[in-house]
Image: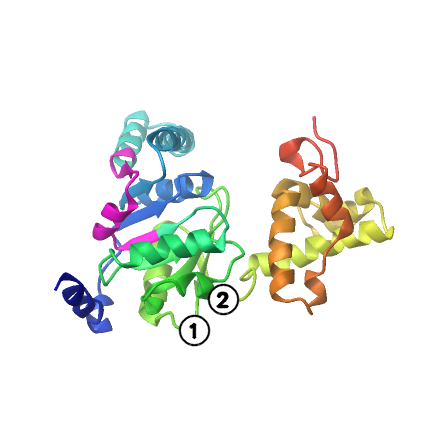
Amino acid sequence: MAFFTHQICRSLSSSAVRNVAIKHVTIIGSGQMGAGIAQVAASTGHSVTLVDTNDDVLKKAIKGIEGNLKRVVKKKFSDKPEAGEEFIQKALQNVSTSTDAASVVQGSDLVVEAIVENMKIKQDLFGGLDKLAPAHTIFASNTSSLSITDIASSTNRLDRFAGLHFFNPVPVMKLVEVIGTSATSQETLDSLLNFSKILGKTPVSCKDTPGFIVNRLLLPYLIEAVRMYERGHGSKEDIDIAMKLGCGYPMGPLELSDYVGLDTMKFIMDHWSAANPEDPSFAQSELLNKLVAEGKLGKKTGEGFYKYK
C-alpha cells in the first residue's frame, strides 16, 4: 500500500510541482565543491544539509566553511565587525550535517550531488534516493564531465533532473552552468536558474553535451597546446607567452593545465575519447599519459609541465 501511495504521489501533475520554491537543500559530498556550494547556499538564507560518509569529514568541512566565512567578513564587513559576526553565525546556523542521506532527502526541495566522478556511483546514489525523495524534489549533479542523461537514467524523475555545475572555488567563481537533458522540464530549469541567481551567481543554460560549455571549449584548447609542445612546434614557455600576450589570457594553456591537474585532464579526455572515438579533438596525448604515469600531475604534486617549489 505504501508503494502504491508513493507512486500516486509521484504521478501528480507538474502544475502541483512547479510552484515549490527551493528552500531546503541537501548536498551530497562535503569536499571542496560540496562545502563551497553549502557555504553560498547557507549565506543566502537557504536551509542546507551537508551529507558525507562520516562525522570527522563533516566536521572538517564545517570548519573550512567557517574559515571561509571569516575571510568574506574581513572584506565585506571590515568597518562593521558586529554585522560580520552576525553574518557568520546566521550562515552557520543554516547548515546541518548528516551521514544519512536517505533520511534528509525526504525534506529536500533540491538535492545536489558533488561526489567522485564515477558514473556507477552517481547512478547508484540517485537511484536509491529517488525512491525516498518527495515528488517535487529536484535532483542535480555537479559533474564537470559525465553525461547528465546517463546519470538521470537511474531515476524515475527525468523531468526533475539536471546538471548544476559550479566552478572552483565556489564562493569566488560567479559562473554556474545549468544543464538540461531532452527530458528536463522547463519548470526545473527555471527553478535552477533562479536558485543560482539567488546565490549571487550568473547562470548559463546549455544542453547535455560533453563538457557542457566551459570544459567543452577549454579542454580541447589545453590538449591542443599539449600536442603542439609534443610535436616540437613551440617551447612550453613560448606557447604560454603567446597565448597570454596574444589573447590577453591571464595564464598560458600549459600553465593552466598544471593548475587544473594533468590527471583531471586525462580523466576527462579518456572519458570523452571512449564515448566519441572518431572525434579527433578527443584523441589521446602520449606526453600527457606519460606525465600522469610518472605522477607529475601539475602544481599539486610539485611538477607537471613546470616545476613548482
Q: Where is residue 2 in the image (x, y as percent from the top left)?
A: 14, 61
**Viewer-side residue, 40 vs 104:** 104
Residue at coordinates 19% horizontally, 71% vertically from top-left? 12
For residue 228, side relative to residue 187 (left or right): right
Q: Is residue 295 magenta?
A: no
Q: Mark 2 points at which residue?
A: 208
Could you say which quadrant of the image residue 256 lies in?
top right
Q: What stretch is highlighted in magenta?
A: 92-111
Whether the residues at callouts 2 and 1 have beta carbons within 8 Å, the answer is yes
Q: Position of residue 128 (x, y in %)?
A: 32, 55
**Viewer-side residue, 258 vs 293:** 293
**Viewer-side residue, 257 vs 201:** 257
Extreme residue in the front direction: 1
Return the mark for residue 182.
1
Q: Distance between the residues labelled 2 and 1?
A: 8 Å
For residue 308, side relative to residue 171 (left or right): right
Could you say which quadrant of the image residue 51 lies in?
top left
For residue 120, side relative to residue 27 (left or right): right
**Viewer-side residue, 243 vs 21:** 21
How busy is the neighbourhood of tag 1: few (under 14 within 10 Å), some, or many (20 plus)? few
Instruction: For the N terminus, give its image quadrant.
Output: bottom left
Identity of the amino acid at label 1? Ser
Q: Position of residue 88 (x, y in %)?
A: 31, 31
